[in-house]
Image (cartoon, helix red, strand yellow):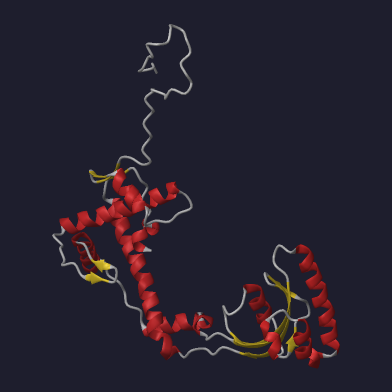
């Protein structure tokens, strides 16, 4: 491209000062996504980029694609509501009031999409097939001895591990000495109570410690030191209180809500697929099951 500015003070053929600003017209950036439309109604790139903020993704391109699909689905539903002369008064929601468009979409789905209710038998069957989901968490009553060393203290961690191994050998011969050895060696304040950590439930400790507890039985000493970011632990599981299965009657309504929410998503996805099949959609591949509206 020709230079749009010539310095009259330079003789012909002389080199311009490198510090002078470039006067070349920069090329226009390419649009990220273009020509997205539903039955001839254009969805602007500006609206898609604004919507992309609501679609976290691994990279901007994926967020833009998800945003474009969401706006296409929205436009499909709005056009169908208009075709059926469906309107509704906006309702107050937890995050603010609905827009008239959102209200129309809600009313359209309520009128056009049949959502089956979950029967008691279906809820019971789900309960029987997923009983562990309805169990209270087990409780662990445990004690430990901590040989502390930070994650990056490689030499200290090696020493801590060796000490832990030695103390485990002592405890295997003399388990009743646990409280005394905790007082002598542990770097945790619990040493003052013999290493007693009280009652622990899921999430009370770091994952490695919790995994070790789950594999132990009441009255058991850990056979190997348990490594965590804090260092190495010797664990004694005083008692494990197993979780109880909640009665079906206590969780029936929760199960019904889960099943009906899943049915709603599936039915709305199928409805959107039908609308998309009879619409002219350009610029984006619309996958009903991937639409953020029905997840």
Quarter-of-image position of residue 255: bottom left
Q: Look at 37% across and 11% down and name the residue there.
A: 8
Closest to the observer: 71 or 268? 71
The C terminus is located in which quarter? bottom left
* Percent of width and height locating residue 173: 86, 88
Closest to the observer: 21 or 295? 21
* Percent of width and height locating residue 269: 34, 61
Closest to the observer: 208 or 148? 148
Q: Is residue 265 visible?
A: yes
Quarter-of-image position of residue 198: bottom right
Q: Look at 31% across and 74% down and name the residue there.
A: 116
Quarter-of-image position of residue 30: top left
Q: Is residue 217 visible?
A: no
Closest to the observer: 159 or 205? 159
Q: Left or right? Give the position of 241 relative to 108.
A: right
* Percent of width and height locating residue 115: 30, 71
Q: Left or right? Give the position of 233 relative to 240.
A: right
The N terminus is located in which quarter? top left
114 over 65 or under it: above or below: below
176 over 156 or under it: above or below: below
Q: Look at 44% across and 89% down and name the residue there.
A: 248
What is the residue that sits farthest to the bottom in this orientation? 176
Q: Look at 32% across and 56% down and name the residue there.
A: 273
């Amino acid at each position: 491209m020709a230079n749009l500015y010539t310095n009259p003070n330079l003789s012909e053929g002389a080199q311009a000062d490198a510090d002078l600003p470039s006067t070349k017209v920069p090329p226009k950036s390419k649009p990220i996504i273009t020509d997205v439309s539903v039955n001839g109604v254009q969805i602007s790139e500006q609206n898609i980029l604004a919507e992309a903020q609501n679609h976290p993704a691994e990279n901007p391109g994926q967020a833009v694609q998800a945003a474009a699909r969401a706006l296409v689905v929205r436009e499909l539903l709005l056009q169908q509501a208009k075709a059926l002369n469906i309107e509704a008064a906006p309702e107050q929601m937890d995050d603010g009031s609905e827009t008239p468009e959102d209200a129309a979409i809600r009313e359209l789905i309520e009128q056009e999409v049949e959502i089956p209710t979950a029967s008691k038998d279906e809820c019971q069957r789900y309960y029987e097939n997923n009983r562990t989901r309805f169990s209270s968490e087990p409780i662990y009553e445990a004690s430990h001895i901590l040989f502390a060393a930070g994650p990056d203290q490689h030499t200290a961690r090696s020493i801590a591990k060796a000490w832990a191994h030695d103390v485990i050998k002592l405890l295997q011969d003399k388990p009743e000495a646990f409280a005394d050895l905790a007082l002598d060696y542990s770097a945790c304040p619990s040493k003052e109570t013999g290493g007693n950590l009280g009652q622990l439930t899921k999430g009370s400790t770091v994952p490695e410690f919790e995994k070790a507890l789950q594999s132990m039985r009441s009255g058991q000493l850990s056979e190997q030191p348990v490594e965590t970011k804090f260092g190495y632990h010797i664990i004694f599981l005083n008692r494990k209180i197993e979780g109880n299965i909640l009665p079906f009657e206590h969780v029936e309504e929760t199960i019904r809500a889960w099943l009906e929410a899943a049915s709603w998503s599936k039915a709305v996805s199928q409805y959107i697929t039908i609308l998309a099949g009879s619409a002219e959609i350009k610029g984006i591949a619309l996958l009903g099951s991937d639409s953020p509206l029905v997840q």
